[in-house]
Amino acid sequence: MSMIIMIIYYIISAFILGMLIWNFIREKKSTNDMLLYLLVMIPLILRLLRVK
Amino acid sequence: MYTQIGIIAAVMVLAYVAAKAAKASVEASMLAAAVAGGLAGAFVNTPPAAELARHLVEGAFTYLDVILVFSTATIFMAIVSESGGINYVVRGTIKSFYNLRLIALLLLMIIILIPGALTGAGSVSLLVVGAPVAMALSYLGIPARKVAAILFIVAGLSAAAPPVNIWAMILSAGTAIPYVGFELPLGIPVLVLGTFTVLFLGWKKEGTGDKESALEDMPKTPAGMNWWRVLLPFLVFFGMVAAYRLWPFSTPILGLPLQFVIAGLVAWLVSPTKINILTLSRNTIQRLLPLLATMIVVGMLQQIMTTTGIRGLISFAVISTPLILLFFSLAVIIPVSEGVLTYGGAAIIGIPLVWFLDSIGLHATVAIAGLSLLWPLGDGLPPTALIGRLSVMVSEYKGTYWTFLRSTWVPWVVITIVGILMVVFSAKLDFLVKWSM
Amino acid sequence: MKKERNIRIVLIVVMALVLIQAGIQLFQHRHYQIPLVAGPGVTKVTNLSDYCEGLKGTQADTLVFFMEGKEPGGKLLIIANTHSNEPAALLTALIFLENAVVEKGTLIIIPQFNHSGSRHTRPGDGYPLYFEIPTSWGSKQFRMGNRDASPLDQWPDPDVYIHYPDRQLLSFLDIRNTNRTWPGRANGALMEKVTFAAMEIMRNEGVDLAVDIHGAETMFPVTNCIVAPEKSMRIATMTSLTLQAREGFDNHVEPSPKGFRGLSHREIGDYSETLPFLLEAPLPFLDQPTGPKTTALLLDGKDPFLLKLSQKKKLFVPYDENGWPMDNRVGQHCSAVLELLQQYSRKNPERAIQVLQVPRYAEVIEKGVGYYYHDPAQTEKKNVYFN
């Protein structure tokens, strides 16, 4: 059971990462927002890759 | 050592000021400070240059779980809001209690308190219930400046309210004190101070208008919305929280993010209106961006300040301050640390402070509770001013930020006095902890 | 439009470079193997998962070394790296592992008890990734770990951690802290399985004494001490007095609080016949008011802020310009373990445990910790384990 829950957490992380990427692509004007989207992606990417 | 750390700190401050001068956002300016501090530190090998990237990235993980809670909780509340649930509740409050001002104000206060109490983030309160509550308050004849002030103070108190108080959790984890017994030491002052705030700022009806015109102006709730549809997702959420408390050894550990996801799915299923979950999630993450980015950058800043020794120097300064002066200075250093570092302030100043207070015979749990009342005040202070900015935004107050902040001064001072007295007399208030357990 | 695209590309490239460089270092840290040399006393090596099925194939599984003596006697379990950011514990355990010769009784050693935590770095606290101990054959490199297990191995945390079986509420983080999950359970969270497996060793093997080795801040009241529950108190007190009288260092006794659950010194005693002891040596690196968190601070414990605070009487241990070097901390632990054995054996001659070839405090300080470590490259392969 705990393994299934852990997998769901990876799915939740991937979902939020997906939303960040989607917003990053849609962002056309604000360099600041582009930077912030990329910053928030950092831990999610490394968690999904099981690095950290 | 003092000179070396002082120079690195100066470089960080300069980088921050320069970035702000170049019109960068608060988050980008804090990132500039973290990177500049890391680079300056690398000259003296604290941290080694080859490890600077690792420190920044590792720091970004400090509040990853908090980010997941923020994201999922806000998506959950956004679904409830999109389904018309929040409007339904606020409308119901106005409809039933417009002429019973005391009850209306208290109910609206409770509505703001709940999301923050559940998530530990006052910003979640404002993001999900802020706008309709602000509207209801303005229909009760409260001017926008005071509405913003009420939202700011009560949302701050909601973050301090039990069961989830992130400052207390950080301090408990960092000082090996169990996160237990906080219900009354936090719950009582939050309710008393919240009541004082809404009554002080909201009791006087300053505008004209009546119940009918208010209801006429308020957004309509979709057909088919009823109390069950509003309450069911919350019952599911609290059911899961309660199930773990009641049967901890046979209930799987779901964690707050998954609990919010499940509650969100229930809210989505029972919504009388069709909700596009992808678009709603995307928009929610977009709205949350400054908050999420702040959590990332604060983690980076915290890591760089530790690896360069700045955090240690700050801790040293706090602990070296004479006791009486320390008690008085809490009024300034606690909110300012929050304004600069958000939750990082609790880790950098709070942990050594609580250890020190514990070692001189004060009661750590009550002292932490007292300090947790002061930290949210800092969320109105620049550079971050997270809750303050959101309060102004959702109340649609058009004046300057300082005018808004000035109107919070009476509750601010009262909360400060209560918080500091709780710290000073923590040993005498230990019965609150015992009664909570 | 073109400018916007260029900015986007630059941001992505910079972020990717930072992510790749940091990612590689963090990945290497998680997968770095420390060679452990099994000394002449080692007779059997098992895994913790042999005592709890649920640990098999996880990063929480770890090596358990048995050193069985020539004569039967009592049994001692040494638990190190319960908190992997308190490395004197591992260094002490390795001195026993590589050098001890057991004459009587059995020594059981778990060098990396929270194995997952040892492969996890601590976000926000700016630790180095590794530290090195100089030896006559070069430097021996160790991972610097974290207090809690990695979320890669146990995720998510609950909103509040409810301790089994006492139902005490603890901080959510503590469900990954193997000094809050005792006595554990076979079907609980991964770290509860780790402590459960250790309890099974103690119950199944009939362990007489368990020593859990730690390090603590100089500003934390429970430091430089032996923590013991009521049933271990007599031996702890005798040990403390003897160490003070014969070896000249302070290691006072702290009673294990009954109301604070999940700690080894409380639960081992309550849920088995074993006598538990928890050793704390000062670890200035963990204090908040210190300068940069460098490997030098970790190893020599010298810090100007702490020195100033010591002069203002704000520390709980004596502290001067010499700091608290690693050799002193490890030496203190070695002597404390040996003295506990001696005191126990004196009281229980039929369950005596006799260990030779392990240095005491003065000797470790004189020769340095690294003196006692053997070169894995020069050791027979079958005696080198990676953990």
Image (cartoon, coloured by chain):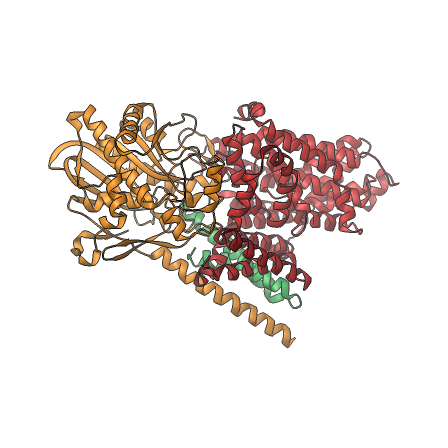
Residue C58 is situated, as x and y percent measured from the top left of the image, at 33, 49
Residue placed furthest toward the left: C70
Residue B347 in view in this figure: no
Residue placed furthest toward the right: B208
Q: What residue sits 45% from the left and 30% below the top?
A: C168
Residue placed furthest toward the bottom: C2
Q: What residue sits 85% from the left and 42% below the top?
A: B213
Residue C18 is situated, as x and y percent measured from the top left of the image, at 48, 64
Image position of C233 (left or right of B352): left
Q: Which chain comes out orange in the rendered image?
A: C
Quarter of the image that includes the N terminus of chain C: bottom right
Please say if B15 is above or below C256: below
Residue C264 in view in this figure: yes
Question: Residue B157 or C252: which is nearer the viewer?
Answer: C252
Q: How many marks?
A: 0
Question: Residue B160 or B306: which is nearer the viewer?
Answer: B306
Q: What residue sits 27% from the left and 47% below the top?
A: C369
Question: Residue C273 or B312: which is nearer the viewer?
Answer: B312
Question: Residue C70 or C255: which is nearer the viewer?
Answer: C255
* Quadrant of residue C109 within the rendered picture: top left
Q: What residue sits 64% from the left and 53% below the top?
A: B275
Please say if B1 is above or below B193: below
Residue B399 is situated, as x and y percent measured from the top left of the image, at 80, 51
Q: Which chain comes out red in the rendered image?
A: B
Q: Which chain comes out green in the rendered image?
A: A
Residue B415 is situated, as x and y percent measured from the top left of the image, at 68, 34
